[in-house]
Image (spheres, rainbow, N blue to C red):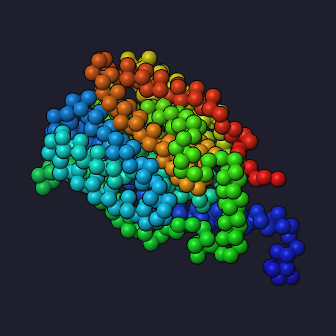
Amino acid sequence: MTHSQLDALAPSGSREHDVERATIRQVTRRLVPLIFVAWFVNYLDRANIGFAALQMNQELGLGPEMFGFAAGIFYLGYIGFEVPSNMIMHRVGARKWLARIMVTWGIVSAATAFVQTAEQLYAARLLLGVVEAGFFPSVLYYLATWYPKQHLGRAISQVYSANISSLIFGGPLSTLLIAHFHQSAGFSGWRWMMLLEGLPAVALGVLAWFVLVDRPAEAKWLNAAQRGWLTSTLAREEAAAAQTGTASFRDAMLSPLVWLMGLLYFCIGIGFFGISTWLPQVIRQMSRLSIVEIGVVSAIPFVLGAIAMLGNARHSDRRTERRWHLAGALIVGAAGLAGSGLTSGSPLLSFACICIAAAGIVGSLSVFWTIPPTFLAGAGAAGGIALINSISGLAGFFSPWLVGVARIRSPDFSLALYCLAAGVAVAALLAIAAPYDARHPRHAEPH
């Protein structure tokens, strides 16, 4: 009996499941590696200022508050251009727009190596935010146009782990570059780091132009059965979301739930940006480690965060439950930050609490981003996701500055850690109270 005859005898549900599994595997193999690497470089270029500070602050004459402002001003440019950038992406297509974003942020990031004053650093960071705006929500929207809701959480966690991988490997990489190239050709090590970590984004932008495909119907690397299953499944979910959710840009901008989710993500960002920006200097205060050793130790909390994020997303997808997977992770994050402040007199114990905090905060991220696509669709999804991320971007500006201000007013980082813990605790309360139904999502197929 031939394979085709065997297929004909197989139950239709079994055949569809096989097509589904093969399709998701093929989509993941084709899209996720490039997006993963791009996201890795994206966050590396954004966050390496925390390691540059180990040399840069003295060279440019930056105090704690000035450094916090320099780290945070990136997000002012990012916020202002986030929604317009994502709407342009919705019109011109992800391939062109993501390629443009990668090339321009790579150029600006590399050029930051040549700043000579605090004011020039502020300008470079602000411009980096402008040209990078839209990358994160564009990637999320792009994934939502390729993955059915049942598979979206895992896909987001896979590419979002690039963000965390950047924090894991970015520290050792950045500090090695600083130490190895210091004073080569008369350039400080932090300048070489900025230059060498910025240029790969340009190459990735060129590659994205040739590799990415805007929509499943155009994917020649899917066979007819896979293309048909994916387009029909996504169309049904899109129609359901349009009927029960927010499908227009205007409605998304006016939706109380979008703004509430933005506030929730802002509070998560208070903890995340505070830790990721200041961790190298927190570790320096706790220890007498070298720059390279600080880079290695700073990776430990985010290793645990990556494990927590992947595990939490997988379990959340399996249970089709979002609320308590999100809130529970945030409760752990808030407790870890508060514990680190309380144990600041014991460096090892305080650092262990930071590791717990990172596991909770990072573990919440991919679960959070599975929720907006359940009540947003089409242009509403493009605009709504961008708005949520823009509101969070305020935390990217506010949190590093807040830590700098608190550090000046305290003999150590304990006051700053309490402030971060309060922000994450509010996020946990919002996650519990927000009016989204995660167990019975609004995108369920109509009968």
Left or right of 389 in this view: 152: right
Q: Quadrant of residue 227?
A: bottom right
Left or right of 353 in this view: 101: left
Location of residue 364 in the rendering, given as x and y in whole percent from the top left corner? 56, 38
Residue 49 in view of the camera: yes
Outermost residue toward the bottom in this view: 2
Picture quarter with the N terminus: bottom right
Residue 45 in view of the camera: no
350 versus 211 height, above or below: above
359 versus 204 height, above or below: above
> What residue is at 86 percent from the left and 67 percent from the top?
11
Left or right of 62 in this view: 266: right
> What residue is at 44 percent from the left and 49 percent from the top?
83
Q: In which quarter of the image is residue 278?
A: top left
The number of discs equals 0
> What residue is at 59 percent from the left and 64 percent from the top?
27
Location of residue 217 in the rendering, given as x and y in whole percent from the top left corner? 61, 71
Location of residue 313 in the rendering, given as x and y in whole percent from the top left corner? 61, 44
Location of residue 214 in the rendering, given as x and y in whole percent from the top left corner? 53, 66
> What residue is at 33 percent from the left and 22 percent from the top?
406
